[in-house]
Structure formats: C-alpha cells, structure tokens
Image: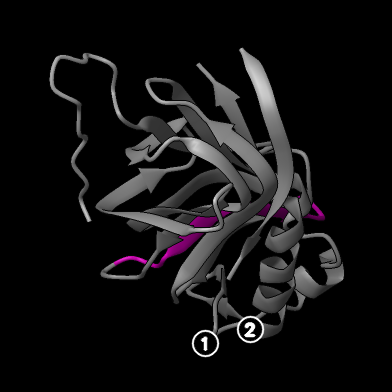
Amino acid sequence: MKSTSILTAGICLAALASCKKKGDDTPATANVNYQITTTNRSSGLINWTAASGTGKQVSFKGTSSGGARVEEYKLVFNQIDLFTNAAITSLPVPPGNYQNAEFNDQMIPSRDPGLRLQGSFTSNGTTVPVRVNIDQFVEIATRMPSINLEAGRNYTANLTLDLSKVTEGITATQLNNAQRTNGEIVIAFYSNSNLLLTIINNINNVMRHEVTVN
C-alpha cells in the first residue's frame, strides 16, 4: 500500500451516481473510502476505554487543474465506534489532479454527543470514571496541498485520533479537583468546561489523516 500524504487535521466536527460511457466498462469516478480509529488508548493521564461519534456527512472539496471548484457530499447517519477501524462510508469523486483538497467527516449530536470519549483516571490508588461529551457540531477536516485521483482506483482516507495526547496541558491536580456528577468526572460545556476547551484544542493538533491507494 502506497501512502500518498499525511497531514494534521482539525476539529471545527447527496448521494451520487457513477456514470459510464457507452461501451466502456471503466468507472468514471475515483472511489474514496472513509475510515476512523484511535491509537494509544492507555498511555496518558486517562485510560480510555471507549470512543464514539455520531456521523452526519462526509465530503470532498478541491480545485481541479482547470480551475473549477469540485465539491462532493454524502449523507451518513450512523453511530461510529472509534475503537475499531470503523468504515464510515465511500464517496465517488470525479478523477483529476486537485489543489487544496479537503477530506471532511462531519458529526452532529442527536440523542448522543457529536463525539464522546470514556475512560478512567487513577490517583492515589483511587480510580474515577471519566466521560467527555462534545455536544456540538464536529467537523474533522484535512487540507492537502495536492492529490491526483484516478478513475477506477480505490483510495482510503484514514482518520486517526491519538488519545494519549488529548489531555495534554491538563494535570492530575485539575482532575482531582474537577466537578463530579454521581462520582463521575463529566467534561462537557455544562461541566468542567475549561477542561473541555483544552481537549478540543488538543484534538485539533493530534488528529492525523492519511490517504492511501488500495
């Protein structure tokens, strides 16, 4: 498997038909498969045990070599388990050499948060459950300077969240002093919001994106 590009991604979190020329069995589009997962789940301040997201939409945006702006979207309403190498969906994209290309995955809260992390924090022999709820629209977006997508080829857009780094800047003392709800440290806009802002800023810097050719 050849890696085309790896870039840092940020968090901000129409069905299409393929066409073929008559008598030509070559697909008219490139196919991009979106996947998402997590790494380093137990190497940090918190031992993470679960991560999930509520999918809404994936998209591709880029400027073709002819200068035209190309935007493709696909609605995806699903619950994503980030502790697996979760396949989100596939998106057909017109082939071409693109500048300023973007691969986006959008999450939106419904009955569940847009993004939720769960784990535990241990201090002085005491273990406390921890839950992070991002109850807002979440967009994981990656911008690539250039990429060439070929008709009939399959590409995989891998989004990977390094969980060991999402609590950087948060100390054990802050967690020990954090507000608790029924014995659980809940980090959300309505509870320990200062810690949530730190986590969101960290996710901006530790989400990695890799596009590979199958």
Residue 124 is one of the magenta-drawn residues: yes
Residue 185 lies in magenta, yes or no? no
Q: Amino acid at mark 1?
A: Tyr
Q: Secondary structure at mark 1?
A: loop
In the image, what residue occupies the spot 85% across and 71% down? 173
The stretch in magenta equals 112-125
Q: Residue at x 73, y 45 (%)?
A: 7
Q: Give the alpha-carbon distance from disc 2 to disc 1, as whole Å.
A: 6 Å
Picture quadrant of residue 49: top right
- The reply to whether residue 29 is visible in this rendering is yes
Looking at the image, residue 116 sits to the left or right of residue 65; the answer is left
What element does badge 2 sit on? helix
Q: What residue did someone put label 2 on?
A: 193
Count residues near mark 1 (Cα–Cα under 10 Å), then give few for <14, some for 14-19, many for 20+.
few
Where residue 19 appears, as percent x and y from the top left, is 20, 34
For disc 1, the marked residue is 190
Task: Give the residue at x 37% y 46%.
Answer: 80
